[in-house]
Amino acid sequence: MKNVRFILQGMLFAAATLLTLQAFAQDIDFDPASIKPPAPEYSPYLEQNYPDRVYFGDTHVHTSYSTDAGMVGNRLGPDEAYRFAMGEEVTSSLGVRARLQRPLDFLVVADHAENLGLAPMIAESNSGLLKTEFGRKVHDLVKAGKGAEAYAVWGAGMSSGKDPLKGQDALTRSMWERITASAEAHNQPGRFTAFIGYEWTSSPGGNNLHRNVIFRDGKDKADRILPLSNFDTTDPEKLWEWMADYEQKTGGQMLAIPHNGNLSNGLMFDNITLTSKKPIDRNYAELRVRWEPLYEVTQIKGDGETHPSLSPTDEFADFETWDKGSFGPEPKTKDMLPREYAREALKRGLEYEQKLGVNPFKFGMIGSTDTHTSLATTTEDNFFSKATPAEPSPKVIPGRFEDKITGYFETPGGPDITMRSYQTSASGLAAVWARENTREALWDAMARKEVYATTGTRLMVRVFAGYDFVADDVNRPDFAKRGYEHGVPMGGDLWTAPAGKSPVLVIRALRDVDGANLDRIQVVKGWLDAKGKQQEKVYDVAWSGDRTPDKNGKLPPVGNTVNVADASYTNSIGEPMLFAYWKDPEFNPQERAFYYVRVIEIPTPRWTTYDAKFFKVELPKDVPTAIQDRAYTSPIWYTP
């Protein structure tokens, strides 16, 4: 209807313009036919304004300013985090030299808001901190070599929800302004983007409802507020109110990125609101999709695309799965899973849209790390772990594998809910299609969902959907130009299909220049059938080699060149580039649907395999020796 209105307006405007020109011509003997279009310009790129580059970055890095990083050994602050992301060599907190193979394009230092900067204040014996009873207590414990006791004192406050530094806004402000100053100092428009951001660490019952808040703005606006914390509220609706107040007060803009639904124990995509326990209504749906356009689908604490019990026919569903519990004592139960994973939420979102008129779970997908080492490392051969106690160092082997991530509040005699360091993933990255490497351009691309997730590699993916693409479009040198002219990119919307037509996806995927070849391209479709029942199907649409699907449509595995003892592989299988033209063969124009692209790489050694070789230790028994890294694009939605 919106498009029809614009077309009618354009026709009326054109008619009015023509009548005006005719009347004007009669008055002054002027011939409209004499108007000539401007002479063509030689350069074909003068008017090109569509996104033409993919930028890779991390929206989720914790430094020593996060208490759960700084008080467990991390000594690197925001400056070191930005320098490392920009490609400089940095020495880790355990004394190991580290550098990325290639610099990132952008970074968000997303330190926890809760008692922001406590560890640096202790280290410098901050006079303001020492004026408080709590501050003196944890300071003296740390200085006496009792850091674990100090951390336990702070942790008790976090668990109870009682802020041990309540009323000390001046301390928080001083730390916040250091962080924003660091972002400002390292932000280099056109070369490297240092976003201002932080993490709101909502943890009701120890369950993960965390969000990263990303500012479009600079220090001048960000310094006019203090980050909202878990001590202020655990309710996402209150976070959205705070975000709205910030925008009204400053004229700035921000968005929030939920993460780790697989550790939320069914709360991340619940069908009721957190505080009132009322069913999701239209107002909630509008607010959620307004403030949370993205979801962090993969990171160090496991992969959140889907779960094997939710997608039993998807052979790639069981990837880096964490499904034992959360940070609290409650074990995972099967009924929680549908409210934790991205694909299931996307399907349920269609149902909500049909019922409410708004889809609360209409999100794009990115990956990031959630590293607490200040080092945004995402490749299997350069993984510096979740937190400093498990960084790669002779000082911590074999503890690097065994360090606990969850399970600290496990019920004695109850089910095992512990997840350990060897189960963490060397993941992930946020990939953003934009015109330029600036805060504004990247943030705007995030807001419109023209982004995708990778599990750590820098493979390139581009997809467009429309009704008029032809098979040869994937081979065109102006692939993107045609894609924008005749369709919509990832994160976009298709409306009611023209009579007799079905959605067509044109897809290009290119391997990481320094990484593994590609196994296949898949299209993941979710829809509501004629009876209103949620459905999903995974289609193999392009693959390497001369493999042929079996009678059930399943493609044989690509093979495996991984040498476990040597922690190596070769690109003798797979393809460096795959193209796909795919027309939905089971399209019903009356059914709501979404489509996203999943690109799978060939098997490569997992980080634990690299570690076993380097440190000459035994591999853990229950982790794979190889994995297949992948990318997930933001969906494209079809709405009749």
Image: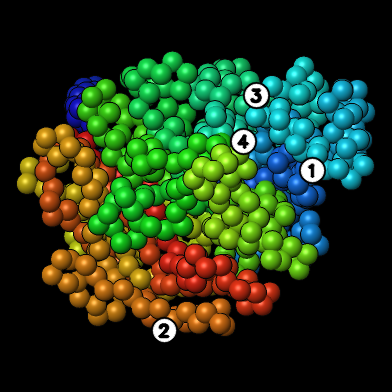
Task: Give, as a three-letter code, the residue at label 1.
Answer: Ala
Q: Quadrant for the N terminus, please.
A: top left
Question: Helix, strand, or loop for circle 3?
Answer: loop
Label 3 Cα neighbours within 10 Å, binned few <14 / some 14-19 / many ≥20: some
User: Mark 1 or mark 2, which is nearer the start of the sequence?
Assistant: 1
Separation (CA) of disc 2 from disc 3: 54 Å
Badge 2 is on which residue?
Answer: 572
Q: Is 160 rendered above or below residue 565?
A: above
Residue at 12%, 51% in the rendered image:
586
- Is residue 465 in view? no
CA gap between label 2 and label 1 equals 49 Å
The residue singled out by tag 1 in the image is 148
Residue at the spot of label 3: 161
Check the picture and name the quadrant holding the C terminus: top left
Q: Is residue 6 left or right of residue 411?
A: left
Question: In the image, what residue type sits under mark 4?
Answer: Glu
Nearer to us of marks 3 and 4 is 3
Depicted 60 relative to depicted 8: above or below:
below
